[in-house]
Amino acid sequence: MQNITLQTSDSGLTANEKLGRLSFAASNESSGSDSILVAASVYAMAESEFTVSSNATSIVFSTASSEEAVDKLKITSGGHFLPVNTNVYDIGSPSYNFRNIYANT
């Protein structure tokens, strides 16, 4: 099996520092301006200081509309799927529905 590892050279990670990022862009797009900005990215972010007994990390998803990619969603080290901003994003749409949503409220 082949692996690719993105790693930081930082020797003292603290909360909200990025460990590695995978970004997507069309840097040769002839339209210029917004079309050449980073359109999407996925990165790992430390949730707190890394220690001998802790490396809590979130995965953050960023997408763009007419700007550099902006953080939208994250999966925390505890497995929680969270929006980065409250009351902004939807799950599904009038045209594309999820069949079932299971929740324990």
Image: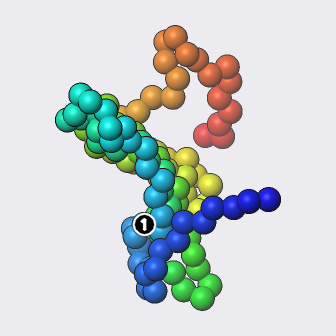
Residue extending farthest to the left is 33
User: Which is nearer the eye, 102 or 94?
Assistant: 94
| Residue at 55 percent of width and 16 percent of height | 96
- Please say if 57 is above or below 87: below
Residue 72, visible in the rendered structure? no
Image quadrant holding the N terminus, namely bottom right
Pointer 1 residue: 18
Return the x and y of residue 101 as percentages of the image width and height. Answer: 65, 29
Return the x and y of residue 64 as percentages of the image width and height. Answer: 34, 36
- Please say if 6 is above or below 90: below
> Within 10 angstroms of label 1, few (less than 14), some, or many (20 or more) residues?
many
Residue 6, visible in the rendered structure? yes
Q: Residue 83 falls in which quadrant of the image?
A: top left
Image quadrant holding the C terminus, namely top right
Q: Residue 52 falls in which quadrant of the image?
A: bottom right
Return the x and y of residue 8 as percentages of the image width and height. Answer: 47, 74
Q: Residue 35 falls in which quadrant of the image?
A: top left
| Residue at 68 percent of width and 24 percent of height | 100
User: Which is nearer the eye, 82 or 40?
Assistant: 40
| Residue at 58 percent of width and 79 percent of height | 54
Q: Amino acid at mark 1?
A: Lys
Q: Secondary structure at mark 1?
A: strand
Left or right position of 94 against 37: right
| Residue at 60 percent of width and 66 percent of height | 5
Residue extending farthest to the top is 95
- Total labels: the figure holds 1
